């Protein structure tokens, strides 16, 4: 498989077009906002456009002009989607439902597909998440 590195703005705009066209897109993830479930620089995600999205879905969303995040939906209020990274302790992003471009249908970890899950238990652990993440980062 050939690897190509492009500026985020260029890459993500093209990814959004491919997803809107019904294509599956595999992206190598960078950053730590989805730890411990998605590891930046190591894991990839396979994305696909969906008819609808639900709380707990890991999605690629445009949260600002050409600013994309791969975060979990924590709430949908009408047409407003509230997102938060699994590795984030505070702070959320918001976007319109139309700015959600696709859902991670699975994660590729060590060349094997892994289910994304809904993160229900992880969301309930938010009050103690900082301690769990600190332990994870030391392992």
Image (tube, grey):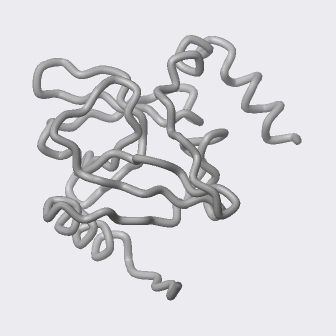
Q: Is residue 2 above or below residue 48?
A: below
Q: Is residue 71 above or below residue 30?
A: above
Point out residue 91 in the picture as x, y percentages from the top left corner.
44, 29
Residue at (26%, 45%) from the top-left corner?
Answer: 63
Quadrant position of residue 30: bottom right
* Residue 65 located left or right of residue 24: left
What residue occupies the far right of the structure in this picture? Answer: 139
Point out residue 94 in the picture as x, y percentages from the top left corner.
26, 33
Q: How many marks?
A: 0
Point out residue 92 in the picture as x, y percentages from the top left corner.
39, 30
Q: Is residue 13 above or below residue 58?
A: below
The quadrant in which the C terminus is found is top right
136 or 49, which is in the foreground? 49
Quadrant position of residue 133: top right
* Residue 7 located left or right of residue 124: left
Quadrant position of residue 26: bottom left
Point out residue 12 in the picture as x, y percentages from the top left corner.
30, 66
Residue at (40%, 47%) from the top-left corner?
Answer: 104
Residue at (22%, 44%) from the top-left corner?
Answer: 50
20 or 95, which is in the foreground? 20
């Amino acid at each position: 498989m050939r690897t190509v590195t492009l500026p985020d703005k260029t890459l993500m705009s093209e990814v959004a077009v491919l997803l809107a066209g019904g294509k599956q897109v595999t992206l190598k993830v960078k950053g730590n906002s989805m730890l411990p479930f998605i590891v930046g620089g190591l894991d990839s995600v396979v994305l696909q456009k969906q008819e609808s999205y639900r709380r707990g879905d890991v999605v690629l969303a445009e949260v600002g002009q050409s600013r994309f995040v791969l975060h979990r939906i924590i709430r949908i209020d009408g047409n407003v989607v509230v997102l938060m990274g699994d590795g984030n302790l505070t702070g959320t992003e918001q976007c319109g439902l139309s700015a959600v471009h696709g859902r991670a249908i699975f994660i590729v970890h060590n060349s094997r597909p892994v289910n994304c899950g809904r993160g229900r238990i992880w969301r309930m652990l938010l009050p103690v998440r900082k301690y769990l993440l600190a332990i994870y980062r030391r392992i």
